[in-house]
Amino acid sequence: MTIPTADLQSSEINLTNCETEPIHIPGYIQAHGCLAAIDADDFSIQYVSETIDGLANQPAKELLGKPLDALLAKTDLPGDDVKALLSLGIRDNAWSRINPHRFRVNGKEWNLIAHEHDGLILLEWEPAISAQSNLDQQLIAEALTEVQSNRTLTELIQNTARRVKQIIGYDRVMVYRFGADWHGEVIAEEINPGVDSYLGLHYPASDIPRQARDLYKTNLVRIIADVNSSPSPIYSVADSVQNRPLDLTHSVLRAVSPIHIEYLKNMGVRASFSISLLYRGELWGLISCHHSTPKFVDYPARQAAKFVSQLLSSALEFRRNEEEQLFLFQIQQNEQKLNSHILKDWDIVAGLTQHPITAMHVTEATGAVLAFDNKFYPMGQTPTESAMAGITNWLNTESFDTVFETDRLPELYPPAEGFRDVASGLLAVALSKELGEYLMWFKPEQVRQVTWAGNPDKPVTISENGQQHLHPRKSFEAWSQTVRNTAEPWKEAEVSVALKLREDVLQVVARKANEVRQLNERLRIAYEELDAFSYTVSHDLRTPLSSIRCYAEIIMEEQGGGMDDDTRVMFQKIMDSTERMRSLIRHILYYSRMGRTELNFKHLDILKMLDVIRDEILITEKKKNRNIRIEFGDTPSIYGDPTMVNQVFTNLISNATKYTQPAAEAVVWIEGRETPREVIYSVKDNGIGFDMRHANKMFELFKRLDNAASYEGTGVGLAIVKRIISRHNGKIWFRSEPNRETVFSVSFPKESHN
């Protein structure tokens, strides 16, 4: 059984699928050649083009599934030579060395071009034309000599167009350069007398859609020998690679999209040839060639034209690198001077804005602004201060971390249209997005008159079923358009040096922050002294309190039944008050000790620790006739001080238990989870909760929320937890909803990140 692969000719290309049209699997090849795709392992024929019958002298479909010998059987092709050639290509991956291989088949000269892809070897035969190798070699030698000379890039581009025209003999040869938005411009041209010139015309990006540009980076040479010829369908065996269309990405015969054929016909073009120009591995442009009659260029001539073009690509890369390096050196020198000014002045504002070389001079901008410390410091031509405030507010909302650049600011930030004459281009580096501090550079609007090859909007027709269909434009007469709100694009060198200046500024900010840290160190010492004082006072108060309680207990025991009720109540209040005072002093003492206690880090069994804490709390709650559940989820190990970590969980779980008293069914849930850097535990309860708006003083000493005032407590427990977590380089946070739930979360760094 045989089936045709994807049917390009009958497909409908519309607005919804033009950009995704699978042009690498058209299911057809051009009519001037023939194709067979064989299995790379056993050389069995998996795909053939209909035109193969002219080479094989037998119907194409009868060859499917048969060995390669069947294709060669009725020709005078030397089968052993062909298979030896393919074996060499497979063994050494030497396809580029063996292509093309010239054969004489049935009295006609053919070039065999082979390549391996996706487990298949694609064999493509196309006519071989009498060679003009001497002329081609002479033109290549001239191009090589010229690239090595000091000719300008403009001259090299123009001469490359001339040499390609000499090699392939087409009516028109254009060098077509892509813009940042992928529209194209003809920057050089060689044409025959009487042929309309397209020099200087622009073409919209939609003329060469994304998937076509991707193919141009992979398959650098493309010929369409006759736009009026009917493409030859490709047939495959029914089970060939899951009945998949043949991938013609690297094919020299691949058929063309119907839209592109219509496009060429509308231009009056009957043959087309193109060569990709790459810069740093990306598509920079094309050498695009047109002919008014069908014209086939054979493989050797195409390779000669490709080589000449690759010399241009190399020159392009070298010359542009040279220009960029010179520009980069100049602005790097300016950046180094700025860094020296900042360090010498020890003042960011003065160093960047008050010397002959300012921050503006690290780019080609015409204006710059330093937004720092709630002020704007303009340099050169800039928007007004209120406009700059609007820009910084807008930048604060944009999703970038370090650098932002655009050459079309009014399109992204509509208010910028009001000052597009000075700021259509914006480059900004963030010093601190939180504080709204930026270095910004501006480029003015460049009003351009762009001349398009016809109206760039693709015409659309509506079919009876309402489907929109695309058709290429039929007129290519010059069509002018004024382009506004755009600036000169930012160069990579400008962005990189702006980032270097940012690092230098932040280094000075950090050094100034270090001075603040030194002041903080002095403050820390003062705090330690205060801790020591607190410890001393707490310790000295414990003895008289113990005496008061002891004497009160003795008096109550000695008086026994002789003490009246009022007196007994008063003595009980004395004992309760001293107990609360002792608890408060104990907490203060523990809090003050934490600043001096040496930590003993270990890997802790948290489940075992939580079991002990739960048992102690449940015994206490049972005495109060309370029914409460304390449950655990996952309990990963924590790397910390055993005593202090125990105190953290004791305080958090005790608080959760205490504040669930009104709940009909009190539940406290504790669980942990691990991340690559830390272990996080949460303690959740279904108690009274609190309003998050009033929780800003949660961890301050002796501070308690209003709805917790009726519950026992000293206001020290969470301050202790906070301090313990800080000493472990961890974090504590919380969330709560009144009368529903409260969740406290703590994180402990893992050993490797502590």
Image (spheres, rainbow, N blue to C red):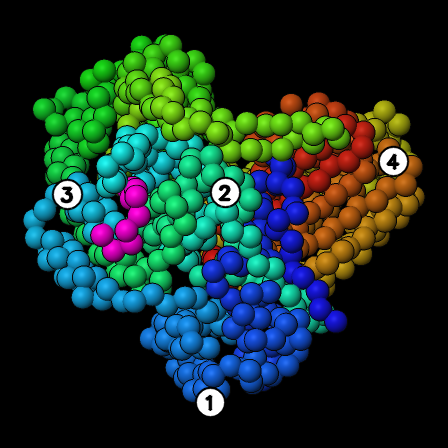
Q: In this rendering, would 344 be left or right of 176? A: left
Label 2–label 1 contact, CB within 8 A: no
x and y percentages locating residue 341 in the rendered image:
13, 32
Q: What residue type is labelled 3?
A: Glu
Q: Tag 1 or tag 2, which sits nearer the N-term?
A: 1
Label 3–label 2 contact, CB within 8 A: no
Q: Which circle marks residue 80 in the picture?
A: 1
Label 2: which secondary element: helix
Give the CA distance from mark 4 to mark 1.
91 Å
x and y percentages locating residue 518 in the rendered image:
29, 39
**Quarter of the picture holding the N terminus:** bottom right
Q: Tag 1 or tag 4, which sits nearer the N-term?
A: 1
Q: Residue beneath label 2, please? A: 260
x and y percentages locating residue 206 in the rendered image:
48, 36
Q: Tag 3 or tag 1, which sits nearer the N-term?
A: 1
Q: Does the magenta stretch include residue 688?
A: no
Up-down relation of residue 472 to residue 234 (above or below): above
Q: Which circle marks residue 155 in the picture?
A: 3
| Magenta segment boundaries in residue numbering | 166-175
Q: Residue beneath label 4, please? A: 663
